[in-house]
Amino acid sequence: MHGALTLYLGDPATAHDLAQEAFIRVCQHWDRVRRMDAPGAWVHRVAMNLATTALRRRNAEGRALQRAGSAAGHDAPASDTDGAVDIRAAVTALPLAERAVIVLRYFADLTTAETASVLGIPEGTVKTRARRALANLRREPGVPEVIIDG
């Protein structure tokens, strides 16, 4: 789960914290969780909900800082790229809905049905988002084809 959260968030430290928080919640609700048909899916759902909340909070804070920097006349720092596209960077650049599907399906190795359950969306939507995300990844130079065609 930690690897999937790291890919989803782009931040290993936050991913570690949220994975711990998800397991704490499992322990707190163990009497209910152990009776579920798919307790693992519930853990993933809790973790993804925590991660989505963290991303929204981080994005809101980033926009506020950017507005403050623009008002003060500061430019955004230039990005330092060497031309090689890292799979993590490519996945992180995907729209949030597509990123969630890719992370759960291909990096957390959940089935289409499990991914749909975790995200609370129909299986057809999982397939559509996965197809779009893979198409976006195919357009990224340097992304290993084994990742997107395998």
Image (spheres, helix red, strand yellow):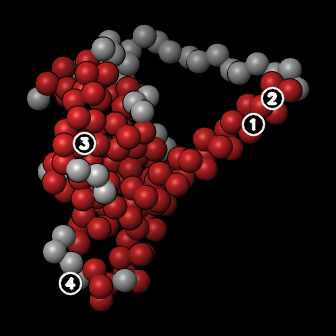
Which residue is at a point 16% across and 74% down the rendered structure image? 37
Element marked by disc 2: helix
* Label 1 sits on residue: 65
Tell me the amino acid under the disc marked 1.
Leu
Examine the rendered structure and indicate whether residue 108 appears above or below residue 66.
Answer: below
Give residue 35's mark: 4
Q: Earlier in the sequence, mark 4 or mark 2?
A: 4
Kindly identify the amino acid type of the residue bearing the numbered disc 3: Thr
**Is mark 4 in CB contact (under 8 Å) with mark 1?**
no
122 sits left or right of 26 in the view? left
Q: Tell whether label 1 touches label 2 (CB within 8 Å).
A: yes
Left or right of residue 19: residue 129 = left
Spatial CA span between label 4 and label 2: 51 Å
Q: Identify the residue under disc 2.
A: 69
Q: Residues within 10 Å of mark 2 (few under 14, many from 20)?
A: few
Residue located 56% across and 17% down the image: 80
Which quarter of the picture shows residue 76?
top right
**Disc 4 packing (10 Å; few <14; some 14–19; many ≥20):** few
Who comes first in sequence, dot 4 or dot 1? 4
User: Which label was assigned to residue 77?
Assistant: none
